[in-house]
Image (cartoon, rainbow, N blue to C red):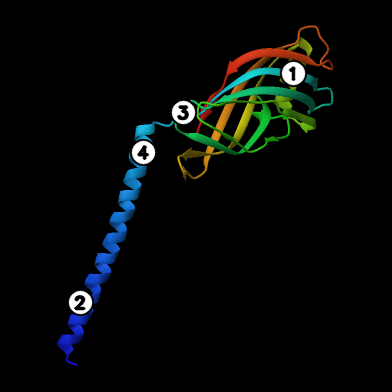
Amino acid sequence: MSVKECEHHKGCRRKIFRRIFAGILIFLLIVLLTILIIWAVLKPSKPSFTLQDVTVYAFNATVPNFLTTSFQVTLLSRNPNGRIGIYYDRLDTYVDYRNQQVTYRTAIPPSYQGHKEVDVWSPFVYGNNVPVAPYNFVGLSQDQSSGNILVTIKIDGRVRWKVGTFVSGRYHIYIRCPAYINWGSQSSASAVKYQLVQRCSVSV
């Protein structure tokens, strides 16, 4: 076999590889473009959350720099999309006071929310002798004495979107629900339920 024939075969192989690579690249671009077009047509919207009520079972900041709390929160979640379902793979709920977590995390069971569906969750969140920063403990003690407290119900988790048979990758979701609680002259040891109907901020 001559040198020219070898070079000719090498050139043919290179052309074949280039065509295969170009074909794969074009196919992937078409798939991505199709997904983007479908996504733009459907116009997916993030879910909305509303804090319906909070029941306070305990709020005791008696030990220096430690807090014991027990809450039950009722959350309403709505999927505004008419053609997109939402998988809630993981949702952790906890209570925050002045940017410090003051309860343990409570997991909400994974679930699927269909088109235009509404779900209601009522998790318990609590903490036993949770350490609190000294500068926050002063505020907590004052709030306990006055019977007024502003806390934030937070939910962190991951969601997936479902369009037909297509399911997206996981996205982080952050929900923040401010809750102003005023129990007045009632004892913090008593179970007190507060109807709030407070819209929450949602970011994905």
194 on left or right of 116:
right
* In this view, the mark in front (4 or 2): 4
Give the distance between the C-alpha atoms of the residues marked 3 and 4, in whole angstroms. Answer: 14 Å
Picture coordinates of residue 85 (x, y %)?
Answer: 50, 34
The dot on residue 81 is: 3
* Extreme-front residue of the structure: 164
Note whether 30 is above or below 106 in the view shown.
below
Q: Quick check: marks 3 and 4 in contact, CB under 8 Å?
A: no
Q: Quadrant of the N terminus?
A: bottom left
Residue located beneath label 4 in the image: 38
Q: Are marks 1 and 2 in contact (CB under 8 Å)?
A: no
Q: Quadrant of residue 146?
A: top right
Q: Position of residue 116 (x, y in %)?
A: 51, 26
Estimate the spatial distance between the alpha carbons at disc 3 and disc 1, rounded to whole Å. 31 Å
| 1 or 2: tag closer to the N-terminus | 2
Q: Earlier in the sequence, mark 2 or mark 3?
A: 2
Give the camera-side residue of 2 and 137.
Answer: 2
Name the residue type under label 3: Asn
Nearer the observer: mark 1 or 4; the answer is: 4
Residue denoted by label 1: 55
Q: Nearer the viewer, mark 2 or mark 3?
A: 3
Instruction: Please tell me which residue lies in front, 40 or 51.
Output: 40
Residue topped by disc 2: 11
Q: Position of residue 149 (x, y in %)?
A: 70, 16
Residue type, numbered disc 2: Gly
